[in-house]
Every structure is written in C-alpha cells, then in structure tokens.
Image: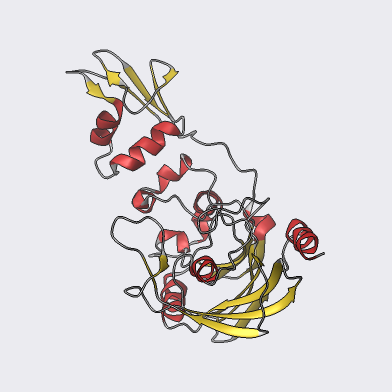
Amino acid sequence: MNDQKIPFTGESKRLDSFLKSVYPDYSREFVKKIIHSGAVKVNGKAAKPALELREKDLVEISGAGQDDTGLKLKDMTVYEDKSILVINKPAGLLVHPTDSNWTRDLKSLEIFKDTLAALLHSEMADKYGEGVERLGIIHRLDRETSGVMIIAKTKKAQDDLLVQFRERTVNKTYLGAVHGAIKNDFFTINAPIGRESGDKRLKVWEYGRESLTEIRLLKTNGKYSHLEISPKTGRTNQIRVHLSYIKNPVVGDMIYSKSPFERLMLHAFKTRFTHPETGKTMEFKMEPDKDFKRLVKELLK
C-alpha cells in the first residue's frame, strides 16, 4: 500500500465505499480497519468510514498506520538456519491481522505494524525463498499467548511443516494456570470443538471436529492449578475451550470465562518436530517470562 493523495470527484460517496473502489481486492471490513488505524485523512483531518466525501475533498492514504511495537525479531529469535526460524513470541503480539487481505498485499502490513507478520515483512523480506506463502507462518498463537513458534523460510520447509502439523506429528506442550482444583495427576479431554452458525465463539459441540487434549497437573492449592497441557489436535482456541468446558478456565481468559487478570496465563513451552531439510528431530523449550512465573507463584501461594 503506497502513500497516495487522491482528489475526490463526482457524486457524494461514503469514505469506506470510495476506498473500496480504490482497493477492490480488500474487503469492506479491512478498509474500515485501515481508516480506523489513522492511515486515512480527508482534507488533512482524521475521518470516519461513514464520512460523506464531496467534490474536491482530498483523500490522503498513508502507510504510517499503527505505532511500531518497538519489538525486533532478533530479540525473539531462538534458532535460525536457511530453512526455518524459531521464535519466542511475547504475550500481546498479534501473529497477523484478522482480515486475510494482508496475504494478497503485503504492503498493507504497513498499516498493522503491531503484528508478527509486519515484523517478518520488514525484517525478513530478503531471506525468504521463492514461493513461500503467508510470510512462512504455518501456525499461530493467540495474541495473549506467549511461547515457541516456527516460521518457514523456504517453500520446501513450509510444505513439509504443514504436512507435519496436519498429520499431528508436531508435539506441542503448554504451561497454564487455571481456576479451580484439578484432582487427577493426568487425564485427557476428548470433546469435539465447533461453532454454531451465527455464533462467534467456539465451544464443545457434538457436531464439531475431533479435539483431544492431554492434561498433567503440576501443582494446585484448591483455588488455582498449574498445568502442563498437550493438545493432540490443532483446533483454534482448543486449550481454552476444553479447559472452560471442564469448568477450569485459563486464568485471564476474557473470551471463554470472563476472568480479568494481568494477562492470559498460557505459554507455549515446548515444541518438537522433524527438521524439513535434515530430517533430524528438533526440540525447543522456552521458559515463561518473569511476569508469568511471578503470577503463577502468586496464584499458588
């Protein structure tokens, strides 16, 4: 998305409708996000999507958008070679914009600088091999979840890792703190997850997709419990949905339990997979940050 100054001509039209005509490949919702980000001004002033444009209005589109996060990939990097990048994503960093239009026009990431995708685009553009899609992002963590993520740098690595995730040969282990007492040292939650038509939230639902999660108790004080969690399937929000389903929601989960806290108490602790080039087993462990450890200690004291 390049900086532009466009004089408006013709009959009156809403700003979002006008921008949709300028960027026909973008959805209306994505156009609204661009406007709300502050990247669009009319006659030098911030504007709302519903603003009616009139003859000779000047529409200015800037790539400035949201403020830079101040984060650098080098500070997150755990491992890198010619095929893959392994990072420790901090809590609060969105992996990519929720609208898929960014995959069609990577320059639109200049509007959404507070994402991992924007960091990859700005710092890794010259490191990707030909044919890599979605900036090598092959899986994701929720914005408030921290921990290990794998990024593909070549088409071969991307294709191979996608197969590993699809065939469930990537082993992932999370650490989490939940509400309530957990009585069993080890157990599994085998409950399908899906979303009814018109419902934005996922839930355990008889018509959902097979979902399996293994739970190991680390410590409990009756009010809170510290867990090691291994999702065996890769459904969206699987851990949060399953733990909410058994009435032990993740502390800080404002979607599935409405439990206000300093942060979501979920961390992707360990990931094991097969290197797409060498065939060797790779395992990466990242301890939670100091705040996570402090909060676990406070909850279980």
Q: To which quarter of the image does residue 53 belong?
A: top left
Name which quarter of the figure residue 68 lies in: top right
Q: Residue at x 76, y 70 (%)?
A: 221
Question: Where is residue 79 drawn, in percent x and y?
Answer: 65, 69
Q: Is residue 181 left or right of residue 5?
A: right
Of the pair 3 and 24, the residue shown nearer to us: 24
User: Which quadrant would the N terminus be assigned to in this image?
Assistant: top left
Q: Is residue 40 left or right of residue 69?
A: left
Check the picture and name the quadrant holding the C terminus: bottom right
- Colour convention of the picture: secondary structure
Q: Residue at x 78, y 66 (%)?
A: 300
Instruction: Say how many tags the image has.
Output: 0
Asked if one can make out residue 63 in the rendered structure from this viewpoint, the answer is yes
Q: Is residue 285 visible?
A: no
Q: Is residue 181 above or below residue 20?
A: below
Expressed as whole percent of the image width and height from the top left, the position of residue 186 reads 64, 85
Q: Residue furthest right?
A: 301
Instruction: Name the image quarter holding residue 243.
Output: bottom right
Q: Is residue 128 left or right of residue 100?
A: right
Q: Is residue 56 above or below residue 92?
A: above
Residue located farthest toward the left when viewing the structure as drawn: 11
Give the residue drawn at x 42%, y 83%: 167
Q: Looking at this view, is 191 or 294 the one in front? A: 191
Image position, residue 232 (x, y; %): 50, 81
Viewer-side residue, 119 vs 172: 172
x and y percentages locating residue 177 in the rendered image: 67, 66
